[in-house]
Image: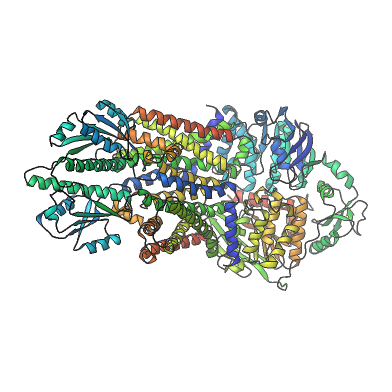
Amino acid sequence: MPARIWALTVKEFLALLRDKVSRMALIVPPILQLVVFGYAASFDLNHVPYAIYNEDSGAAARNFLARFAGTSIFRPVAEVNSDAQAARLLESRDALLVLHLGPHFTRDLLLHRSAPVQVIIDGRNSNTAGIALNYVSAVVQGFNEQWAADHGWDHPPALLKIRAWYNPNLLSRWFIVPGIVGLLTLVVAMVVTSLSVAREREAGTFDQLLVTPYRPLEILIGKALPGLIVGLLEGTGIVLIAVLWFHVPLLGSLAALYLGLIFFLMSAVGVGLMISAAAATQQQGLLGAFLFLVPAVILSGFATPIANMPPAVQYLTYLNPMRYFLVILRGVFLEGDGVSLLWSQYLPLAAIGLLTMATAAWLFRHRLY
Amino acid sequence: MLVFEDVTKRFSGAAGPALEGLSLTLEPGGIVGLFGPDGAGKTTLLRLAAGLLRPDAGRVVVLGHDTRREAAAVQGAIGYMPQHFGLYEDLTVQENLDLYADLQSLPHPERPQRYAELLRLTALGPFGARLAGQLSGGMKQKLGLACTLVRPPRLLLLDEPTVGVDPVSRRELWAIIERLVREGGTTVLVSTAYLDEAQHCREVVLLREGRLIGQHRSAVFTAPLAGRVYMVPAGEGERRALQRSLEGAPDVLDALIQAEGVRLVLKEGGAPPVGAQPAAPRFEDAFVALLKPAAAGALPAAPRAVDPPSDGEVIRVQDLGRRFGSFAAVKGVSFAVRRGEVFGLLGANGAGKTTTFRMLCGLLPPSSGSLSVAGVDLRSAPAQARGRIGYVSQKFSLYGNLSVEQNLAFFAAAYGLTGARRKERLSRALCEFELTPYRCVDAADLPLGYKQRLALAGALMHEPDILFLDEPTSGVDPLARREFWQRINAFAAAGVTVLITTHFMEEAEYCDRLVLMSLGEVLAAGTPAQIRARAVRDDLPHPSMEDAFVELIEQHEAGLRSAA
Amino acid sequence: MNTRLVGLMRKEVLQIVRDPSAIAIAFVLPVVLLLIFGYGVSLDAKHVPVGVVVDAPTPQTQAFVAGMRESPYFDVREYGGIAAAREAMQERRINGIVWLRGDFSRRALTAGDAPVGVAVNGVDANDARILEGYVQGVWVQWLAREARLRGGRLALPVELQSRIWYNPALRSRDYLVPGLIAVVMTLIGALLTALVVAREWERGTYEALMATPVSMREILLGKVLPYFVLGMGGMALSVAMALWLFHVPLRGSALVLFGSAALFLLAALGMGLLISTAAKSQFVAGLIAIIVTFLPAFILSGFIFDIRSMPEPIQVITHVIAARYFVAILQTVFLAGNVWSVILPNGAALLVMALFFLGIVARLSRKRLD
């Protein structure tokens, strides 16, 4: 690489890393956030607090409740003996759900009659409620199978055996952690690039740069390289933590992963530089960064599947580099995809990268004064 | 009024203290000038007086209040105008005034009268509704002063109020300050890099490297120079050569180009050259005599010779125009610059000089007309063409959070210097511009004068054929300015073409030719003598360049006003 | 109120009016984000492509497949053989396979393993689990129907009757939108103020301000109050959109809603001011603002991921995220009502955070340059 472009890259690095605060801000939070988010971001429920409202003193009821106590998913917090008490616990969020066994639970069962169990659940967080209900019904059906077998009920199996491919225990961490890899890489790339041109414009140094023999393409490369290099290094660190710390399986090829990382960084850096080149002030640059970052994360399929979005919004996601990168990450990590399967993801990323970078380079000289 | 008792102030990271053992007493009344070379501690002294810094040792007492304990009381009684007065550029003139009236708790009933006074004083009345960001540099300074004066302070601290201000506005600013002292009984402490402003001062405080050199009337400083100052008459074409030869003479302390010839300050016991006529010493002579380093820096080596000199025109500007929306910043400007010429672009703040510069450097497309630099338009020319020019912008624009050395190394590489040549240019730049002690200091933390040196060093790194310098010397002390001009003259002698703007009218004398711009138009063009001749009147047979400037600009503006 | 404070506030308001980006932050940002979220984000899977393989078609299998087709949750695609279906799943064209084996009609109603093979793509564990639940539901319905056809009813030992409070239809939008308001307000609060102090440092306006008799407390109040008003405007806009565009019910009182919003906004503005004051340069302030605001509020606030399921140490960490308290209050006030046992402790936490941030800012800001 010509020494001149390298000098520009070195200068960008110095401007970024000489300040202690920005040096720290670039290195510490992504790593810290990966660890914290890796544990925090999960749809799996643990220790769901529940209350017991049991009006039956029979053995079957005890047997039934023991099944709940026996899982790590549920955690009993209280026993109540009135609806009002139950309501208070739900209201204050001390319990997510209340199991209500009527006074005739054991008697009904022993008489071969269906015994109703009422579960009252706090629906404020509908996703949690839905998942918790699924868990509850799984426990209940387990009890049913057992009871039917032990007490000679003749009935067909109500429980289907379901196999999950790629993620047999349905650990949502396996799904989320590769997503966080993408999230943090995006944030780092935006941090490095989105203010870099606006900052120079405000300080007047951009004019100084434009009177040197640098061509816009060279300035672009000089400005893009730090983002790519920092992104690659931090991306590697983040992947290592995902594999070594969180034990997410990395089944596919590293070549496929890094090819994806490079293409993704190209597009993210391109968007960042485009925002930066279009902004007159750093305030505008920051606003632009957020206006891109937030929808990019939300419409990426990171936490909520793209397939659930209305068609118009789904079309919008085709503009989002995160969308493609998440497919690559999950494909490589969990499904063992190789390079050849992922071209349909690489190419859009490369296209976004080239288009945004070209726009940024054009804006360097042609932004209206 | 203001007492410094054995005050020392250090900043973390800096090599030496900014102020050391400084003791100073200011009597009430009049204007006191604060002078000293770059990095002498002028700004630190004013900030200490304003209670914005605490002394590390000693104490500062302002109007009877210790700044350490009673900063609020001090700030209630003084006015302080920092170097870059922080006007809110997105507020109008009137809104800025309102803000400071509120901050100073000026009672509402008193406001209309005070505003009227201030606006009359500063002649900003017609611009009340204009955004401060759209004012010219001189008007901004006047507005800053007006904001500081909303409530008449007993002590007024001004930090380089005239930096970057054209001569017309500078005269107006001083008129305001003098009226204030005369009518309001305010005491003013003002720091400045313009040594001729010592004439306005009752007393002069001279600092160097954080220590007090002296505090006297300016006449006391100039007294020892009686009989050592001479004028050697010379014609316009020969002044530069004469100055260079005299500068090297053993008896000569200082040689300076002036309208009529070369001004000499002799060393003690030195003999004047033949034909020299005695002249009255000025404060500037005393400043140089006191502060010029004993062993003056060796003259910079002549730069490499560029292509054989010819009379070819290097820069040609034809009917150049630029509009910003409905506002025409530059209207039909034409001029041509020959190779090896030092060409000056003079004009009041807002005359369109910087806009012209930006168009020449290819940073801004012209709205009309044509231009060529070294035969091409830099905006559309291949990138290598830009390697032939060097550019120093008006606003300091190097990387503030990179060290001096890193900045220079970057620009060396940007212009494609490599290997041994790059090393050699780097060390020479550090040495020539006396930046070596500051090589590891962040550019943003340099004193103003050193920032300018760094900017110049960066632009000269690649030995360009054409130099664009937009107010390269504003805020730089006289000693550094002398060195700067030595360097420019050496470049010009070697065939480098220099295009320069400046607000120091004595510097205009260094130019081979110049144009005077006003409100986007060329008002006058020619040699310095030709320009001066335009302002000759019966009562002013030998106008200085500054007189000519003020005269021509005022004529033009008055003409426009009456036409409108 | 004293004139100095009034003057500072007027200055700030004028600057806001002149630079449209502050207005954009307060009003455009919430509209754009709420629209995208409100319409774009849903955890309710619908029309999930599922492959169905029927080895030996009979009326029973037809009834089962019809049950799946009637469900809005599935987009049923039939495959001739299990191999073809597996290939489709590998290529991500379908998310699950339901395989009715050859002995389905014979064995379906007897005890023992059901003759149905179900496989789902488990990469998105949450989605997979939801899909599992839906398939399970179709199966039980089919069993009940078959039992009815034979004149009996499906008798299970324990029958679960679920009652869902506050959001009986489990509309995910109803809980995402209130949580989203908290995330958006975090961004607004921090963005509005993250640059305002740093900008004054960079432009040199601070030095001139400080040399006047104005006190540091007045300077800070002059900064907080205008942006507070602006932020509350953004809040009102967000609430209006939640109520009338997304039809989220508001069961608590508007007074509680805006009271807690005020506390939260003070905390968010305080955080922005703290970033700005500590950084002194717009660049560093912007950098920190990007890193510490959005993702933590998004992931650690309980807006999407339930805090109670996080490991203990992470739950402790979430206590430093102001959005966490606000999300709890918002979800409760919108969906449940004025539940003081939720509102009071969370409101108190917000108050503490606001005081903490503003207190630190006041301590850090001195009227001195060194």
The answer to whether residue B485 is left or right of residue A222 is right
Closest to the observer, C257 or A83: A83
- Residue A152 x/y as whole percent: 14, 42
Q: Residue at x 37, y 53 (%)?
A: A300
Above or below B188: residue A8: below
Whether residue B498 is visible: yes
Its colouring scheme is: rainbow
Q: Find residue A204 and report its horizontal and vertical position in percent.
A: 59, 54
Q: Position of residue C363 (x, y in %)?
A: 58, 33
Residue A185 seen in the figure: no
Question: Relative to B114, is B220 on the left or the right?
Answer: right
Q: Is residue C106 above or below residue B8?
A: below
Q: How many marks?
A: 0
- Residue at the extreme left of the image, as rendered: C151
User: Where does the N terminus of chain B fall, quadrant-wise?
Assistant: top right
From this view, report whether residue C196 is shown above or below residue A366: above
- Residues B138 and B13: in front is B13
- Tell me which residue sits at (35%, 59%) in the image: A335
- Residue C281 point in image, percent of width and height: 57, 45
As drawn, is B489 to the left or to the right of B252? left
Is A135 situated left or right of B120 in this image?
left
- The quarter holding residue B232 reads bottom right
Quadrant in which residue C297 is drawn: top left
Considering depth in this image, is B144 or C67 the residue closer to the camera? C67
